[in-house]
Image (cartoon, coloured by chain):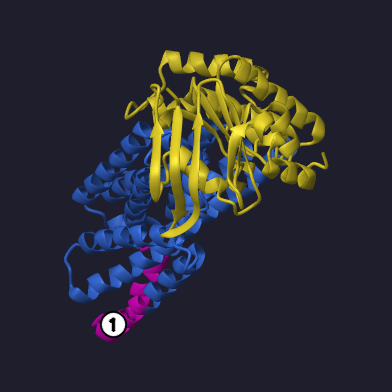
């Protein structure tokens, strides 16, 4: 315990901790909506796109990856959503297409152009989360905090609209709510969250951060509000616990957080069953 | 003046015509049933009534102070809703969305309206319950209460009794009739021709021949006779 406290005297550990918790909070906020709208896969697809974009950024030697990765991922979010409504290529097939395509091209590009001697190490850290969460600089923490505040404010302001659009698109349309615009907004914000969260858990694991807290909370609670609040709490606790464990046992940060999420999900299923709420 | 007037309407989507020469009107206090086979354009007409689909030709108007977002809509249930974690109160309240504009939170009057409609639909006791744990009939009443929050004038019901057992169906029809008697105009899309001629004041028949008239005229008409003997054995 004293060891752990000792760690917190280092600013980089503090930064990592703050950032990690903010990311977990944002990811879980929209998670409930994404799961209920059957959009979970869009999150997964987008994370692969982000990996591809990251590879392009590495090859082009863009100084700050986010500047390139964020717009590309947002663009793909819009495309995927459109594809979901298109009947020619069904939504899930479109997601699969774009996501594996982006993975393949990303890896190809890195292989052909990258000069790095430790290629597989680089790829691995992009996919599964790098130790880079521990090398965050102060301005990156601010950037992340800014985005988180934006996401939270957006969610609070449009909470009821998001509920409406999630529960019953047809009814929402009949009330004159711009359903397509809100869907678009949700997809774009998902893209933002994914790009920010890539630093924490890596692109392959990011959808876990989005869906597990929501699914866990849905086992326990019956109203939208309770589920949303509970999923945020679960997500933040899991992220904090995961980071502490990973510091203590020197395990990879991303995988540890996701593993914690899985364990908590299993516990929630069990509690749900016991209380007859499932 | 009528709430809704349609004159020589041409309906369709993706540039394909599926209905033409459709004329009818809905006046305050009416109980209009729209009947017809599958694929006769009922759902396209419904989208037009909600202002979600522009007619390809003809004239379509909302009148008498009715705006298109003021129609209370009872859609058919979707798969998403079956495992949706939402309380009855949250769902009914969401019917007030239409009048909110960009205001982010519900006001006292919104909540009072939701309460009133929950009492009217006799679901107040379930307010904190989870929607997915209710029976089919209770779920329909929740959605009806939500639709009532969106309107004081016109309800548009899409197959409101599909999937309900006979006893609950009868209860649902009684409830709708009660609403109609209290002054709310009802437009109902239905497969159930027997109930349509029992409760409705007007019938709009789509598919093959288009027929619009009062219930009595419809029963006496050749279209009505044929359809009734086919579907209802009367």
Residue B148, above or below A67: above
Q: Main secondary structure of the magenta part?
A: helix
Query: Which residue lies under the disc numbered 1?
Result: A117
Residue A77, above or below B92: below
**Could you say which is closer to the camera, residue A152 or residue B214?**
B214
Write down the quadrant of residue A277 in the picture: top right
**Could you say which is closer to the camera, residue B171 or residue A213?**
B171
In the picture, measured across the screen, residue A53 lies left or right of residue A35, that is left
Task: Give residue A243's position: percent from left, percent from top.
Answer: 43, 50
Please tell me whether residue A88 belongs to the stretch shown in magenta: no
Write down the quadrant of residue B105 in the picture: top left
- Chain B, hue in figure: yellow
In the picture, measured across the screen, residue A174 lies left or right of residue B231, that is left
Circle 1 packing at 10 Å, graded few (<14), some (14-19), many (20+), is few
Examine the rendering and report whether any part of residue A267 can be seen: yes
In the picture, measured across the screen, residue A238 lies left or right of residue B159, that is left
> Which residues fall within the magenta stretch?
A105-130
């Amino acid at each position: 315990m004293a060891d752990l406290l000792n760690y917190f005297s280092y600013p980089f550990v503090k930064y990592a901790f703050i950032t990690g918790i903010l990311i977990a909070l944002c990811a879980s906020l929209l998670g409930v909506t994404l799961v209920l709208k059957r959009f979970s896969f869009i999150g997964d697809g987008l994370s692969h796109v982000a990996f591809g974009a990251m590879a392009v950024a590495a090859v082009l030697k863009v100084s700050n990856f986010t500047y390139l990765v964020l717009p590309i991922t947002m663009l793909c979010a819009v495309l995927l959503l459109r594809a979901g409504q298109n009947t020619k290529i069904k939504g899930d097939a479109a997601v699969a297409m774009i996501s594996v395509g982006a993975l393949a091209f990303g890896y190809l590009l890195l292989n052909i152009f990258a000069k790095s001697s430790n290629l597989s190490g680089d790829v691995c850290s992009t996919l599964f989360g790098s130790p880079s969460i521990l090398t965050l600089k102060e301005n990156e923490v601010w950037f992340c905090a800014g985005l988180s505040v934006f996401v939270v404010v957006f969610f609070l302001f449009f909470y009821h609209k998001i509920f409406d659009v999630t529960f019953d698109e047809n009814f929402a349309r009949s009330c004159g709510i711009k359903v397509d615009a809100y869907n678009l907004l949700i997809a774009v914000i998902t893209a933002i969250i994914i790009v920010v969260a890539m630093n924490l858990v890596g692109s392959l694991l990011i959808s876990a951060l989005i869906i597990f807290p929501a699914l866990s909370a849905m086992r326990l609670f019956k109203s939208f509000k309770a589920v949303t609040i509970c999923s945020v709490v679960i997500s933040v606790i899991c992220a904090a616990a995961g980071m502490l464990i990973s510091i203590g046992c020197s395990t990879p940060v991303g995988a540890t957080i996701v593993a914690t999420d899985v364990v908590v999900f299993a516990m929630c299923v069990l509690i749900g069953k016991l209380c007859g709420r499932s | 003046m009528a709430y809704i007037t349609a004159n020589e309407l041409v309906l369709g989507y993706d540039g394909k015509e599926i209905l033409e020469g459709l004329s009818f009107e809905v006046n305050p206090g009416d109980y209009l049933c729209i009947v017809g086979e599958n694929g006769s354009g009922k759902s396209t007409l419904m989208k037009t009534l909600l202002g979600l689909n522009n007619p390809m030709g003809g004239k379509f108007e909302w009148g008498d102070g009715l705006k298109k977002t003021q129609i209370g809509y009872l859609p058919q249930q979707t798969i998403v809703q079956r495992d949706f974690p939402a309380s009855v109160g949250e769902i009914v309240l969401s019917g007030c969305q239409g009048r909110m504009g960009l205001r982010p939170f519900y006001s006292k009057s919104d909540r009072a309206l939701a309460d009133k409609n929950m009492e009217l639909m006799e679901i107040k006791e379930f307010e904190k319950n989870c929607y997915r744990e209710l029976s089919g009939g209770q779920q329909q009443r929740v959605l009806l209460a939500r639709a009532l929050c969106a309107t004081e004038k016109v309800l548009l019901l899409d197959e409101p009794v599909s999937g309900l057992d006979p006893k609950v169906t009868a209860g649902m029809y009684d409830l709708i009739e009660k609403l109609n008697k209290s002054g709310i105009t009802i437009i109902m899309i239905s497969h159930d021709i027997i109930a349509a001629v029992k409760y409705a004041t007007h019938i709009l028949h789509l598919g093959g021949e288009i027929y619009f008239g009062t219930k009595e005229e419809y029963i006496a008409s050749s279209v009505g006779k044929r359809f009734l003997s086919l579907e209802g054995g009367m």
